[in-house]
Structure formats: structure tokens, C-alpha cells
Image (cartoon, rainbow, N blue to C red):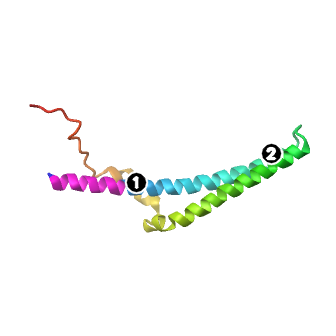
Amino acid sequence: MEWAKSRARAKRWTEEVLLLKEEMRRVLCFLEWKAEWWEALKDNWEGTALPPDTIAGMRAYAISQAALQRALSKDFTRLWEDPLAETGSVNDGLQADHIFGDVEVDDDEDEEDPA
């Protein structure tokens, strides 16, 4: 019984590691998307009724935000490079049947005592 519970815990930890790595990958994708979004936004103010100095300020702010997002992405990539490289393609390991297929759920705490 203890072996089965220990095996289930180990599989849950493996699942958590895979999910964490996928979350890391998604954060990097989001930061790059957000940087591109700010880059596209910087030119959206032309032709509006705003004063030229306000447009210049909004452009500068958009450029600085894009640079900030890219800097965050670069720092996170550096920090997470080794953990993400260990699994190769994270998506290959995150197939639902692979993660949840063998994992047994330990419901001992939720069950009522039949006695």
C-alpha cells in the first residue's frame, strides 16, 4: 500500500514539474507577444486629435514598455534556460494521457469512515 501511495506521489511531482516548465514556456511566449503588442501600439496615435507632444510621449512610453517586456523575457530565458532544456520539447511531455494516465488519486482523506 505504501509503495503505491509513494509511486502516485512521485508521479504527481513529475506532473507538477512538467506543468511548471510549460508555464515557464508560456510566460516567455506571452512576454514576446506583449512586446510586439507595444511595438504595434506605438504607431496607433498618428492621425488622432492629440497634440504632437502627447503623441510623442505615448510613442516613447510604448517603446519603453516593449523594451521592458523584452528585457524581462531575456532575463527569464537566462534564468530558465537549463530547466527548460532538460525536457527538450515541453509540449511533447504534456499530453494529457501521459500525465494523468498512470496517476492514482489518493482519496483516503476524502472518504468517510465506514465503521
> Which amino acid lies under the numbered mark 1 shown in the image of this protein?
Gln
Q: Looking at the figure, which quarter contains the C terminus?
A: top left
Q: Residues within 10 Å of mark 1 (few under 14, many from 20)?
A: few
Q: Can residue 43 be seen in this view?
A: no
Q: Is residue 54 above or below residue 80?
A: above
Q: What secondary structure is marked by label 2?
A: loop
Q: In this view, does 9 lie to the left or right of 23?
A: left
91 displayed left or right of 102: right
Query: Residue at the left extreme?
Result: 115
Mark linked to residue 95: 1
Q: Which residue is drawn at 86% across and 43% down?
A: 54
Q: Is residue 11 magenta?
A: yes
Inspect the image, locate mark 2, and give the three-letter code of the amino acid beneath it.
Asn
Q: For this rendering, which residue is in front, 34 or 91? A: 34
Q: What stretch is highlighted in magenta?
A: 2-15
Label 1–label 2 contact, CB within 8 A: no
Q: Mark 2 points at which residue?
A: 44
Q: Provide residue 55's location: percent of width, then percent of height.
A: 85, 45
Q: As rendered, which of 60 and 86 lies closer to the eye?
A: 60
Residue located at (64% from left, 52% from top): 33
Residue 7 in sight from this viewpoint: yes
